[in-house]
Image (cartoon, rainbow, N blue to C red):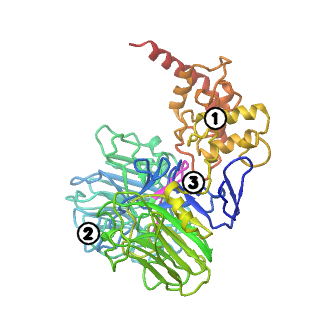
């Protein structure tokens, strides 16, 4: 067995790492990853997990190793117009003299609340024409000249004369506007605060409605960015009555108050079944009115940040983070006087930024000269910029460059090794350049975050585009032979990391693995090969670790697709072992580990609380128990219904 990293200990009886919290060792292989998190396979505390920003997705079409890679794609374009974060509501262009309701709960998270857009189609500069509207904005300070809440429709301003009580108070508030035949009403927390009439002849047929800022398709530099969370968004092609607005403000779900007509415009975002930048309209099934996230808008899966349910939308100013597609590793601190950076890249021909330098690892702030605590490792497959094919820029100002070029649309391993002031660059396991830094000091990034795929800030585009796999940061300097083996076999093989929980050694976490573990738990033999937390016991705790931490799914996910839903009921009842007393495995309904399929398995599943919640979040939230108890009470009816469906399908032609 290969010598393991000095900062990690080999788990008893298995090939896995137990690393100290301070270890600067990180490995992303992008296997079994849900949502917007890249999980570090060398630590278990989540401290070095990466956050995916911009337009990135897990992809199984071109992995270098394993089953998945990460695909970086173009983020929203950064043009001449200052970019702002908005959620565009697709399918919301409006005809002449439209009636409408726009409403949502919003929690302002600005450190100093000021003038903010809520709903808008305004072009961003000049007067508001007849075919554009500022449907709703507000200023709790009045410093902008807007005294509270305002709408601009057909160039007419409807505005509160005084700032409504509570407008500047923290926490969620409900905001709504209705228009009916030119009559405009604005509501705050369920109360009408101002109304007025605008001349007919207005429309909004140029652009879709945007939440959080103007579309700025006409230019402009004014910053009225909404910063915070919003929930229960409604756009409806008629004016709701005041009592309906009050019901929404009181915390009733939109779906319980509004029943859309067959042909009317109706959009409802509750974010409950959404993740990342996917926002689905709950009133339609054709995706025509789904949300389009621009820049820093994403679904927030932290339950405490939601007004209703467990999810909301988070919107942030683009200057508070990245405009580009990248992985935020977070603060890694002191890399020491020996370290290795490596990744497998596959970039499309002509698809990388400006056909030029592309960031791989960077803590650079994005503008000006390199500063202490900043580092860059970048590349250009064609060496088209100053003949730089690969480059390492260190905090002391050292730039080590190689003019080595490589092909596009193929996998290549790029590695940089720092060894007490000596820097060596490798391409596909072969050394292409080496040299000495200006000093042999430790490379300490301090509190500066490390990013993968772009810099920490700035608007110059050096964004990595294409496929990336086997991202590795090690707190030791690999030898030339090590780098060669890393390129050939991949990081998991090089580090002697077996897939934890893969008891049948087929390279996957599947139902056979959890069945083998359940057998060992039932045998009470405490075989160390199945002891996932190294407590010298093999018990239900190890099963919970396998299900929740390793497979990252729910009790009840029979097909192990990452979600627990009605399809799992169909699968287990089709297997036909419910209350037969026959031996059963996970895929056949044994979710509590007693090797049988009976009512106890459903108790275990619904106690875990994942039914119809989608993928398990990276940080598990405690489900509310009372709703599950009510659902458990009705399981008998559900089971009989599903079984009848299966039996009927079995005899149907």
The answer to if 45 sits in the magenta stretch is no
**Mark pair 2, 1: CA separation:** 55 Å
Tell me which segment is drawn in magenta: 298-316
Residue 172 visible? The answer is no
Q: Nearer the viewer, mark 3 or mark 1?
A: 3
Q: Earlier in the sequence, mark 3 or mark 1?
A: 3
User: Label 2's element?
Assistant: loop
* 32 up-or-down from 461: above or below: above
Q: Residue 372: where, in percent of width, then height?
A: 55, 84
Which of 313 and 435 lies nearest the eye of the viewer?
435
The reply, left or right, for residue 441 in relation to residue 101 is: right
Which residue reaches farthest front? 481
The reply, left or right, for residue 252 in relation to residue 356 is: right
**Mark pair 3, 1: CA separation:** 33 Å
User: Label 3's element?
Assistant: helix
Q: Residue 553: where, in percent of width, then height?
A: 58, 42
Which of 415 and 24 lies nearest the eye of the viewer?
415
**Mark pair 3, 2: CA separation:** 58 Å
* 253 up-or-down from 212: above or below: above
Q: Which residue is mark 1?
A: 605
* 642 up-or-down from 586: above or below: above
User: Label 1's element?
Assistant: helix
Report the residue at 62% width, 49% height from top.
Answer: 498
Q: Earlier in the sequence, mark 2 or mark 1?
A: 2
Q: Earlier in the sequence, mark 3 or mark 2?
A: 2
Q: Which mark is residue 303?
A: none
* 547 up-or-down from 580: above or below: below
Q: Which residue is mark 3?
A: 492
Q: Which mark is residue 128?
A: 2
Report the residue at 54% width, 34% height from top.
Answer: 559
Q: Residues within 10 Å of mark 3 (few under 14, many from 20)?
A: some
Q: Residues within 10 Å of mark 2 (few under 14, many from 20)?
A: some
């Amino acid at each position: 067995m290969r010598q393991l990293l000095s900062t990690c200990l080999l788990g008893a009886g298995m090939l896995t790492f137990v690393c100290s919290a301070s270890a600067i060792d990180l490995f992303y292989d992008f296997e079994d990853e849900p949502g917007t998190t890249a999980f570090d396979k060398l630590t278990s505390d989540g401290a070095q997990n990466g956050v995916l920003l911009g337009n990135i997705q897990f992809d199984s079409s071109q992995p270098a190793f394993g089953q998945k890679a990460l695909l970086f794609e173009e983020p929203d374009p950064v043009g001449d117009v200052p970019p702002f974060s908005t959620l565009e509501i697709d399918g919301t262009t409006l005809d002449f003299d439209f009636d409408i309701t726009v409403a949502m709960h919003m929690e302002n998270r600005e450190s100093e609340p000021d003038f903010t857009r809520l709903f808008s189609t305004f072009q961003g500069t000049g007067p508001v024409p007849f075919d554009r509207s500022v449907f709703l904005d507000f200023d709790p300070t009045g410093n902008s000249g807007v005294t509270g809440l305002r709408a601009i429709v057909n160039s007419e301003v409807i505005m509160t004369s005084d700032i409504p009580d509570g407008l500047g108070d923290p926490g969620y508030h409900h905001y709504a506007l209705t228009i009916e035949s030119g009559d405009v009403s604005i509501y705050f927390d369920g109360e009408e605060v101002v109304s007025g009439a605008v001349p007919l002849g207005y429309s909004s047929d140029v652009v879709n409605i945007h939440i959080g800022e103007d579309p700025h398709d006409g230019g402009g530099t004014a910053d009225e960015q909404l910063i915070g969370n919003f929930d229960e968004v409604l756009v409806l092609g008629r004016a709701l009555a005041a009592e309906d607005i009050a019901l929404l403000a009181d915390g009733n779900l939109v779906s319980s108050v509004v029943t859309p007509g067959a042909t009317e415009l109706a959009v409802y975002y509750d974010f409950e079944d959404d993740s990342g930048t996917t926002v689905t309209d709950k009133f339609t099934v054709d995706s025509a009115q789904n949300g389009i996230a621009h820049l820093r808008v994403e679904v927030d899966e932290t339950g405490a940040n939601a007004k209703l349910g467990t999810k909301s939308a988070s919107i942030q100013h683009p200057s508070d983070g990245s405009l580009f597609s990248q992985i935020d590793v977070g603060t890694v601190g002191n890399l020491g006087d020996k370290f290795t950076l490596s990744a497998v890249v596959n970039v499309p021909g002509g698809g990388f930024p400006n056909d030029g330098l592309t960031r791989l690892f960077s803590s650079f702030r994005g503008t000006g000269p390199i500063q202490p605590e900043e580092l860059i490792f970048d590349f250009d497959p064609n060496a088209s910029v100053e003949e730089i094919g690969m480059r390492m820029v260190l905090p002391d100002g050292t730039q080590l460059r190689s003019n080595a070029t490589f092909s596009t649309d193929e996998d290549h391993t790029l590695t940089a090794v720092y060894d007490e002031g000596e820097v060596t660059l490798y391409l596909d396991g072969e050394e292409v350049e080496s040299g000495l830094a200006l000093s042999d000091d430790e490379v300490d990034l301090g509190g500066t975050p490390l990013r993968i795929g772009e810099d920490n800030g700035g608007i110059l585009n050096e964004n990595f585009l294409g496929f990336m796999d086997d991202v590795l940061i090690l707190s030791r300097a690999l030898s030339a032979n090590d780098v060669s083996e890393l390129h050939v076999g991949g990081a998991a093989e090089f580090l002697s990391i077996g897939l934890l929980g893969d008891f049948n050694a087929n390279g996957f976490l599947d139902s056979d693995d959890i069945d083998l573990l359940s057998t060992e738990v039932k045998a009470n033999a405490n075989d160390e090969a199945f002891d996932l937390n190294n407590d010298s016991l093999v018990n239900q705790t190890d099963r919970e670790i396998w299900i929740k931490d390793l497979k990252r799914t729910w009790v009840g996910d029979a097909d192990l697709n990452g979600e627990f839903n009605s399809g799992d009921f169909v699968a287990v009842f089709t297997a036909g072992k419910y209350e037969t007393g026959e031996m059963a495995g996970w895929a056949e309904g044994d979710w509590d580990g007693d090797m049988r399929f009976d009512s106890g398995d459903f108790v275990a599943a619904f106690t875990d609380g994942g039914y119809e919640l989608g993928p398990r979040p990276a940080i598990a939230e405690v489900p509310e128990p009372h709703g599950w108890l009510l659902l458990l009470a009705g399981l008998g009816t559900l089971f009989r219904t599903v079984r009848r469906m299966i039996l009927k399908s079995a005899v149907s032609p």
